[in-house]
Every structure is written in C-alpha cells, then in structure tokens.
Amino acid sequence: MRQFKSQAEAEAAGVYISKVKSFVKREGRLTKAQTRAIETYWPTMGVDYQATPIDLTDTFGRDAPVVLEIGFGMGKSLVEMAAASPEKNYFGIEVHRPGVGACLAEAGEQSLTNLRLMEHDAVEVLKNMIPDGSLSRLQLFFPDPWHKKRHHKRRIVQTEFAELVRSKLALGGCFHMATDWEPYAEHMANVMNNIDGYTNTAAQGDYVPRPDYRPITKFETRGQKLGHGVWDLIYERTK
C-alpha cells in the first residue's frame, strides 16, 4: 500500500487498493431453467448487496436462528438442510450465478420460505451487512484449497477472516468447516487453534465426525469411493 498503513487509510484518501481474492468468479452460462428461477424467485428469496447492516428478522419475516453458508455451489445441500430444519433460517452466499439460479430453482420447487440467497463476495457481506452476534452457525464447506504454496495467501481461512466470523457469531455459535484436502484441514486447524475466543468442539484431536445436518454430496461420495478423506472442523465461539 506504499504510503498507506492500512486498507481503511487508503480508502479514506480515495485510493483503491486491489484485494487478493479467495475465489475465482467463473460466470458460466445460465440454463433457461436457472434464468427463469432467478426471474421468478429472486424477488422473494434474493437479497441485494448493500454496504450497511440488515435486520435479519425483517429479511426472513421472523425471528429464528440464522445459519449462513459461504460458497454453496449449486445449492443442493443448502436446500436439503433448509428443508430438513424449517425452524432455522438459512442464508447462502455464492458468486457463481448458475449456482444461484440452480439453488433458487430447487428451493422454489420445494416452496421453502426459510432460505435467502446473495450473489456477492462473502467477505464484504460479512463485514458490511451481517450484524455482529447474529449467527448461530457459519458453514464453509469445501472451499478452494489453493494447492500451490504461492497461492496459499488466497485461502479464505486466515486469521483475519476467522476473527471476522467470530464477531458475527452469537456466543455459543459455531464455525463449521469441511475440506477434502488434508493439508488445508491442517492449515484450518492451525489458524483456528491460535485465535482467542474459539473452542474446538472435537472430543480429541482437531477433527469431528460429519454431523447429521451436513449432507453428503455426490462429489464427496465419489471421493470416498476413491479412498479420499474428508475433514470436518467445528469451533464454538466462547467469548
């Protein structure tokens, strides 16, 4: 940032500093069904980005525990979770528009009322839109592991991000991560174990068995048949 000591200082001076992204946005082509789903369901299930906090009770039309998922892909698992737990509100963030369309189509077919979606950078949404202490759980399943060492800085699970998540969780709320790349699982554990205010919920070691609420994806099932492992980490906000 040259003469600027922080991102905030640069922004205050009106200077734009490009940020390292933890994702690569691949637009892809929308199918007719996905386009139709966005046109049909976005008015009731979609949330547009704004740079100020939202009232989650107003957003869902009721007061209930909020589970936020970052990077829901095509949304099948997110819809399955929302359908299985109608007593909770589910909020999904994804930058891939075809995935948003597919998720809306699936949710619309099931007439879900406890699901809201956004198409935006999740870090900006967390920083600017999600009120502090408002989430019962934040889910990050199978994020890009950025295998090459020179790309490790792009991994979303870093100290700054984990501290941001903690500020958005209610006391007793959980940050649930899952990955099929063991070096990334080890990286996640190393980051999380060195942050004050979190407690690892594992009975021993760093990892927990897959909770019943997290569906097994086709990708995960295929990996298991090939002998690939999956690591779940759940950390509770304790202060």
Image (tube, rainbow, N blue to C red):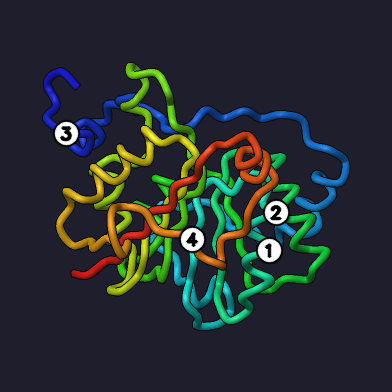
Which label's residue is closer to the chain start, 3 or 1?
3
Provide the residue designation for mark 1. Answer: 80
Which of 83/45 is in front? 83
Q: Looking at the picture, does residue 215 appear above or below residue 3?
A: below
**Type of the residue with mark 2:** Lys
Residue at image location 57% in from the left, 53% down from the top: 48
Inspect the image, locate mark 4, and give the three-letter code of the amino acid beneath it: Leu
* CA neighbours of label 2 inside 10 A, class few (<14), some (14 to 19), many (20+): some
Name the kind of residue labelled 3 in the image.
Ser
Closest to the camera, between mark 4 and mark 2, is 2
* Alpha carbons under labels 1 and 4: distance apart: 14 Å
Is there a contact, CB below 8 Å, between mark 2 and mark 1?
yes
Q: Position of residue 59 (x, y in %)?
A: 55, 71
Mark found first going from the N terminus, 4 or 3: 3
The circle drawn on residue 76 is 2
Q: Is residue 173 above or below residue 179?
A: below
Q: CA distance from mark 3 to mark 1?
A: 41 Å
Nearer the camera: disc 4 or disc 3: 4
